[in-house]
Image (spheres, grey):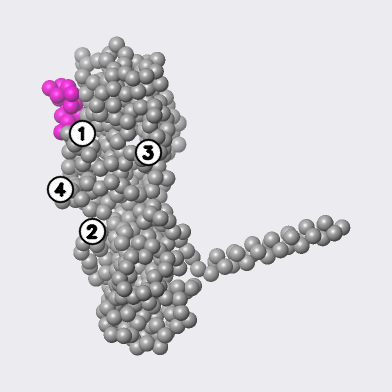
Amino acid sequence: MKKTFLRSRIVVLSALIAITAFFISCQKESVEPTASTQETLHKVTSSSLMTEDFETGTKTAYAGAAVTLGTGSWYLNDALLGNLSTDRKNGTKSVRVQNTGKITMQFDYTYGASTVDVYHAVFSSDASSTWELYMSTNAGSTWTKVGSTVTSSSTTLAKVSFTVSQSGNVRFEIRKISGGTARINIDDFTINAYSGGGGGGGTPTRDDNMALGNPSGAVASTSYPNNYLMTKTQYTMSYNDSKRTCNWVSWHLSSAWLGSAARQDDFRADATLPSGWVQVGATDFSGSGFDRGHMCPSADRTGSVADNSATFLMTNMVPQAPINNQQTWVNLENYCRTLVDAGNELYIISGPWGQGGVGSNGSLSTIASKSIVVPAYVWKIIVVLPVGDNDVTRITSSTRVIAIWTPNTQSVSSAWGNYRTTVDYIESQTGYDFLNNVSTTIQSAIESKVDTGATS
């Protein structure tokens, strides 16, 4: 009897604790902070809005400094995170700004902005102050004023909404412009994504697989057998007749390419190769210790049976070490599709390089009687954009570009993030000119950076 009574009390107590925790968590919406600004960014952009409530992080002095908040890194100059009873706030903290202080995002919100909402009030019983909202679409290089100048005169937080209507990468800055000793509080800064979360303001479509350029200047002429351009509905490639593999494969990926078509597994020779050229067959990799490694993945083309079947043409395959193919590469491919699920579209270029890999049967330079070249490395370049139109023109110096260079061996790590490099490096190895439809200024910026974003 005593044990039953005790169990009942424990159940009741547990329920009360759970209810209390629920109400505490509902007092104010928050975003989980992470150590990486870019990782955080990709988490918050999976919905149609981003709200910074200034509840995380600590900054108790007005001197300019960066502070890591729930959405990423912000720079507060002549501003601090206030938690006094005289700080006007929703929750426990808000930003307090004095003089001509600024609150600046140090990262891009990749979904664009339809509107921005900000709560504001005067600190304590200070006099009225004026402030303005500014926007940058080039990673903070230049700023443009958004909307009208705002006057804070009330001691109660009030919301002001700014109409932005900007697609692509955006970041914002609040500037107190009235100067003087009067202070203001800023809280709950919300970006409503452009067109309700579509980022670029459009419906996902099937776009040009080679929109960003022809890296090797491939030509659809038999006069160029080792740089032969092959254009299919599902992807575009440069084929190398002497290697019996592609040089590179380029494809676009958005949710418009994804559906419910099953994996066809119909590996076969590509009959569209010019007459007289050697065709690699479905069984030519058998017993070699190397997988038939897709460049354009089967799972990136599930919109129809025909789309999926096209990925099983042997011109889309390279001899790939099983661990590289089944672990490292699969993990990267799966991650790419999570980016699409989050509202992005991708432009991807992938290919082999060098000669001599290590498969499950050891090292080989070629396989089969057809002397199919085994690559020493396999690489991939991924350009990430929010869904939208006019994709090339929306690429900026802050656009996320992931470049991967993996050894084609069995000892490769399953964590693809370990193999991040720069586009410049891949260009230096292959001799190709990637993203050549993008302006040279922007190319210089994005091709020299190693990606530091999320890997899962």
Residue at 32% over, 59% down: 107
Vertical placement of residue 376 versus 64, above or below: above
Residue matched to label 2: 138
Few, some or many residues within 10 Å of mark 2 (<14, 14–19, 20+): some
Reading the image, the residue beneath label 3 is: 416
The first of marks 3 and 1 along the sequence is 3
Mark 2 touches mark 4? (CB < 8 Å) = no
Are discs 1 and 4 less than 8 Å apart at CB? no
Residue 10 quadrant = bottom right
What is the quadrant of the N terminus in the image? bottom right
**Amino acid type, label 3:** Trp
Q: Which mark is residue 429?
A: 1
State the CA–CA distance, disc 3 to disc 1: 19 Å
Q: Residue furthest left?
A: 223
Which badge, 2 or 3, is on the more N-terminal residue? 2
Q: Closer to the camera: disc 3 or disc 4?
A: 3
Q: Earlier in the sequence, mark 3 or mark 4?
A: 3
Q: Position of residue 102 (x, y in %)?
A: 29, 72
Residue 317 higher or lower than 288, as above or below: below
Marks 3 and 2: in contact by CB < 8 Å? no
| Distance CA(mark 3)–CA(mark 4) | 28 Å
Q: Which residues are magenta?
A: 212-233
- Residue 440: mark in rendering: 4
Q: Nearer the viewer, mark 1 or mark 4?
A: 1
Q: Where 374 falls versus 105 (above or below)?
A: above
The CA distance from mark 1 to mark 4 is 20 Å
**Above or below, 405 relative to 74:** above
- The residue drawn where x is 31% and y is 85% is 181
Q: Quadrant of the C terminus?
A: top left
Q: Determine whether the residue tagged by mark 3 lies in a helix, strand or loop.
A: helix
Label 2: which secondary element: loop
